[in-house]
């Protein structure tokens, strides 16, 4: 497999999990709740999923593929559950949403690291801070994958990539074609409009933030399965923040954000392949891995002025305010 | 004839009855034992100054607040509204003073929000907008309300947005329509169009409650008028039997001078000369495009225009809050366009900003500090960088007395806790006390009640007598007509028409404000 093809395959395997996290960010922010907590959500979701996977593979005869799907479902629930803390702080108690997001992230790292070693101590008598995951199975689409270069899109696909595409489609439908989506977008732009039209701003926002956590959790789980092959504190590498950046470049719209995420994925994988191509020692890979972050900085310069965040994002909803 | 609204006999034609409503907020009684009854198919006006409790009273009918005491009857049935949604079920609708529209939604989406129709496509519920859009077009025709459901709200002007709000009520089949200060932001032509719409609605059997402090429009459309003052119902009048003066007196509680006497002008030298001024806003859009104007000593030059036509940026550029892109600003012959704000102040500008809370005051500082803002850095208020509080206190007391600034704890009062009228008096007092050759007033009476407006207008005229050049920027056409010696109408960043105030009628000015020249 040549460098370009590897870049495409690896780029998608990273870009799609990034997209599902960014989608989570969009759901929260479009409803009017600023979400810096994507990082914490994805880590916590992945923790719950990895915990379930470890227990299942230890105690049941289930195959690793079934376990993968169950773990992803658990990551969704775990992320949503953890996100309800952010929702509670921001919506019920009108906390500052930026501070709440940061607190959620810090708490997530500490809590999951502590719990992982406690659980490992209990299960294996060894207080390691990792859950080792079975490597995910991958597949290729016959014929299509034989096309030169672009065939790489259809080669060595993780099953979760397909799942993310389906979810992306479904959540796009939810955002733009349903009553819930309409209320969600209204409560992020002008909650007073929704309230006086008979909608429920707080409930809409709460649900949106929980969905946000669930989607981010799936993203974290996928990263754990593909990039890390384990669950460990290294899940908190900042991909959640990268997803937020992608959401901003995508102007809080789902389709552009999708392309930004794929672009980030390709950039990251491209940097790695470039490093291999130039036959540089592995000491330099870390340097090349900074490419997505440098890109973020550069893009921020160009996009910041033109970005239009949801008008009411960051403001607690106060009925009486006129 | 005066009908005290205490009649509680059952009456077929009565659709809304509020009995003995009392509502308290921390520190104030917003409504004190108010009883009114509104008949089906009439336009019922609620007249009162700001803070008289009109909006609060209607907010209770609309379910936004619950009364502390008293009862609400709709069509003879006792109601306990806990939310606007519950009031909407009784066919009550309200157009708020600040529109409740989602900017990036279409007109149609805004109208159906909350009452969407959903159809099924396979297993998926999908919003169905087409039927809704058709119904909106139909309603639009039958009520003469021009709205296109496919327009984006962000592309609409205020009067179109207001029509969308009205359409929202009609789409929900509201029978009782509450309008909260609907004309505050409209041009005279738009006001007339709105009043026509109201009459059209009345003709089709709707009941309208009109909250306003403008007696003129009550005279034009309302059948009856309840007058509130400091939360109490003062009287209910039949509009055709009452005079404007009578209503004004009842509203304010004393004899009001409806039109301030304006002495003949004595113009002096040119004080401010702006030439071909261009200014860009934050989005780099040129919003002031080649404005030239001259203001002489003793002259009130009023810039009239609909909000958002560059008048704020024009004032900011002269005061130094915003950089001019090109053109010149000369104050008594000296080019000040490169001077800092403090240098300009020193050269002789006093500035009463549009947003008094954001640019006029430090809300969390006390009144004394706020009154000394123009002087604290100079002797005797400070020496070698050390403030002289005693001097500041003496000066602040002087101003409080001279300008009748009322507050809870004198000069120690935190400005945030003061009423809007007194906050504005403090700013006006502070700025006028500098005796600058040029005084810029931007929307000086925005949000103030009649008494406070009278006071500010008197101050402006006094400054004119003193010989100051006054640049007045106002969205209130009445204010412009009342005070101006010269009127410049700004439209789309350009002065479309500059003329002697005496040579223009308010209708002509209104037309220029809409961009119609000639």
Image: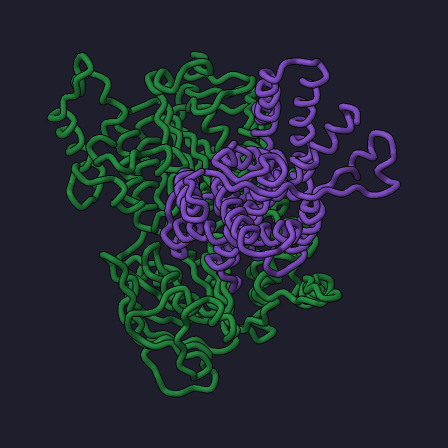
Chain colours: A purple, B green
Image coordinates for residue A90, horizontal then vertical, percent = 41, 49
Q: Residue at x 39, y 26 (%)?
A: B469
Q: Is residue B356 above or below residue A277?
A: below
Image coordinates of residue A263 in percent, x first then y, are 68, 31
Give the answer, above or below, for where B220 lies relative to B241: above
**Residue A190, visible in the rendered structure:** no
Question: Would residue A110 appear left or right of B514 to someone viewing this image?
Answer: left
Can see residue A254? yes
Q: Residue at x 34, y 20 (%)?
A: B345
- Up-down relation of residue A163 to residue B215 (above or below): above
Left or right: where B425 falls relative to B16: left
Residue at the spot x=36%, y=52% of the render?
A93
Q: Nearer the viewer, residue B366 or A6?
A: A6
> Does B99 sit above or below residue B484?
below
Farthest-out residue, front: A125
Where is residue A321? Give x, y as percent. 39, 52
Quarter of the image where one finds residue B213: bottom left
How many badges with numbers are in the image? 0
Residue at screen point 73% across, 33% down: A9
Q: Quadrant of residue B341?
A: top left
Task: From the top left corner, tell me how far across and down residue B247 is, in percent.
Answer: 36, 62
- Classify residue B394 as left or right of residue B170: left
The residue furthest left is B390
Nearer to us in this view, B233 or A174? A174
Q: Quadrant of the N terminus of chain A?
A: top right
């Amino acid at each position: 497999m040549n460098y370009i093809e590897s870049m495409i395959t690896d780029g998608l395997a990273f870009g799609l999990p990034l997209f599902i996290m960014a989608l989570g960010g969009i759901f929260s922010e479009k409803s009017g709740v600023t979400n810096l907590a994507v990082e914490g959500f994805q880590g916590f979701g992945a923790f719950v999923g990895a915990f379930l996977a470890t227990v299942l593979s230890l105690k049941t005869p289930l195959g690793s593929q079934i376990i993968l799907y169950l773990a992803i479902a658990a990551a969704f629930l775990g992320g949503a559950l953890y996100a309800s803390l952010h929702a509670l702080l921001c919506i019920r108690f009108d906390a500052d949403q930026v501070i709440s997001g940061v607190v959620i992230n810090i708490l997530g790292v500490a809590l999951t690291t502590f719990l992982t070693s406690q659980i490992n101590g209990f299960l294996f008598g060894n207080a390691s801070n990792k859950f080792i995951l079975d490597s995910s199975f991958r597949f290729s689409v016959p014929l299509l994958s034989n096309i030169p270069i672009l065939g790489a899109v259809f080669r060595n696909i993780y099953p979760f990539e397909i799942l993310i595409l389906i979810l992306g489609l479904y959540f796009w439908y939810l955002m733009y074609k349903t009553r819930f989506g309409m209320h969600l977008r209204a409560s992020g732009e002008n909650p007073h409009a929704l309230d006086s039209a008979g909608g429920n701003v707080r409930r809409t926002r709460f649900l949106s933030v929980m969905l946000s956590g669930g989607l981010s959790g799936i993203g974290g789980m996928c990263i754990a399965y593909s990039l890390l092959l384990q669950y460990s504190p290294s899940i908190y590498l900042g991909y959640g923040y990268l997803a937020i950046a992608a959401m901003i470049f995508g102007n809080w719209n789902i389709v552009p954000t999708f392309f930004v995420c794929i672009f980030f994925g390709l950039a990251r994988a491209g940097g790695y392949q470039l490093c291999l191509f130039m036959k540089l020692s592995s000491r330099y890979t870390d340097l090349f891995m900074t490419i997505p972050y440098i890109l973020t900085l550069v893009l921020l310069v160009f996009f910041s002025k033109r970005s239009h965040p949801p008008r009411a994002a960051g403001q607690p909803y106060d009925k009486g305010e006129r | 004839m005066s009908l005290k609204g205490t009649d509680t006999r059952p009456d077929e034609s009565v659709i809304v009855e509020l009995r003995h409503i009392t509502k308290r907020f921390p520190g104030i009684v917003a409504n004190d034992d108010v009883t009114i009854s509104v008949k089906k198919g009439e336009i019922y006006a609620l007249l009162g100054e700001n803070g008289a409790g009109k909006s609060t009273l209607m907010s209770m009918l609309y379910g936004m607040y619950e009364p502390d005491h008293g009862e609400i009857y709709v069509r003879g049935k006792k109601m306990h509204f806990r939310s606007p949604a519950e009031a909407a079920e009784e066919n009550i609708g309200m157009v708020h003073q600040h529109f409740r529209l989602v900017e990036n939604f279409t007109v149609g989406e805004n109208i159906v929000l909350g009452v969407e129709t959903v159809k099924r496509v396979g297993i998926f519920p999908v919003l169905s907008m087409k039927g809704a859009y058709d119904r909106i077009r139909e309603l639009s025709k039958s009520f003469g309300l021009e709205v296109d459901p496919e327009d984006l709200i962000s592309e609409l002007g205020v009067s179109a947005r207001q029509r969308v709000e009205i359409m929202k009520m009609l789409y929900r089949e509201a029978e009782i329509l509450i309008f909260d200060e609907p004309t505050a932001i409209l041009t005279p032509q738009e006001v007339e169009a709105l009043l026509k719409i109201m009459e059209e609605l009345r003709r089709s059997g709707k009941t309208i409650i009109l909250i306003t402090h403008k007696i003129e429009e009550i005279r034009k459309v309302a059948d009856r008028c309840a007058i509130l003052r400091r939360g109490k119902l003062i009287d209910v009048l039949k509009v055709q039997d009452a005079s404007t003066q009578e209503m004004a007196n009842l509203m304010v509680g004393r004899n009001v001078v409806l039109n301030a006497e304006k002495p003949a002008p004595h113009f002096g030298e040119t004080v401010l000369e702006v030439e071909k001024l261009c200014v860009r806003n934050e989005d780099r859009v040129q919003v002031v495009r080649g404005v030239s104007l001259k203001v002489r000593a003793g002259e009130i030059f009023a810039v009239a225009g609909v909000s958002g036509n560059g008048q704020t940026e024009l004032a900011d550029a002269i005061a130094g809050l915003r950089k001019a892109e090109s053109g010149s600003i000369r104050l008594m012959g000296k080019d000040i366009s490169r001077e800092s704000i403090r240098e300009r102040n020193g050269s002789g500008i006093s500035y009463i900003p549009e947003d008094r809370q954001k640019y006029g005051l430090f809300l969390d500082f006390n009144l004394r500090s706020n009154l000394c803002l123009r002087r604290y850095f100079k002797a005797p208020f400070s020496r070698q960088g050390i403030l002289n509080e005693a001097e500041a206190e003496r000066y602040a007391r002087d101003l409080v007395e001279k300008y009748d600034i009322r507050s809870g704890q004198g000069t120690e009062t935190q400005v945030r806790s003061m009423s809007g009228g007194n906050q504005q008096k403090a700013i006006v007092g502070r700025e006028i006390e500098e005796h600058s050759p040029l005084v810029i007033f931007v929307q000086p009476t925005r949000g103030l009640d009649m008494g406070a407006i009278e006071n500010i207008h008197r101050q402006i005229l006094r400054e004119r007598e003193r010989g100051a050049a006054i640049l007045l920027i106002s969205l209130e056409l009445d204010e412009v007509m009342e005070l101006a010696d010269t009127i410049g109408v700004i439209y789309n960043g350009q002065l479309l028409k500059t003329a002697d105030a005496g040579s223009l009628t308010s209708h002509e000015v209104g037309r220029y404000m809409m961009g119609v020249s000639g």
